[in-house]
Amino acid sequence: MDTRKAVANRLLELCEQRRLSVNGLARISAVPPSTLKNIINGGSQNAGIVTLKKLCDGLDISLFDFFNTDIFKTLEQEIK
């Protein structure tokens, strides 16, 4: 799995855990719904750290908590 897919999967996982829709997460994070949908659907290949921080703020978690999962710990190096 690449990093883009890992970020998208993590966002969807967190939405499911909190019973939030993608639009609901966008609203509480002050991120345009189109931006979040592009991150999740692959339209954006590089989710910016500022956007991820806003999403984490909306979810009431830290960036550390967002990335502190097995999926990110086991990502393969993308530059070879």
Image (cartoon, rainbow, N blue to C red):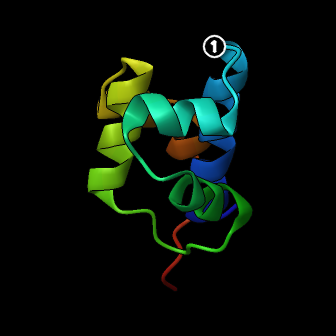
Q: How many marks?
A: 1
Q: Position of residue 23 (x, y in %)?
A: 63, 38
Label 1 element class: loop
Asked if residue 61 shows in the view, the reply is yes
The residue positioned 68% from the left and 69% from the top of the image is 42
Asked if residue 54 is positioned above or below residue 59 in the image, the reply reads below
Asked if residue 28 is positioned above or below residue 12 in the image, the reply reads above
Residue closest to the eye, 69 or 17: 17
Disc 1 marks which residue? 18
Residue closest to the eye, 16 or 5: 16
Residue closest to the eye, 55 or 77: 55
Asked if residue 39 is positioned above or below residue 8 in the image, the reply reads below
The residue positioned 55% from the left and 75% from the top of the image is 45
Name the quadrant containing residue 49. Answer: bottom left
* Left or right: residue 64 compared with residue 42: left
Q: Residue furthest top?
A: 18
Q: Position of residue 77 (x, y in %)?
A: 51, 69
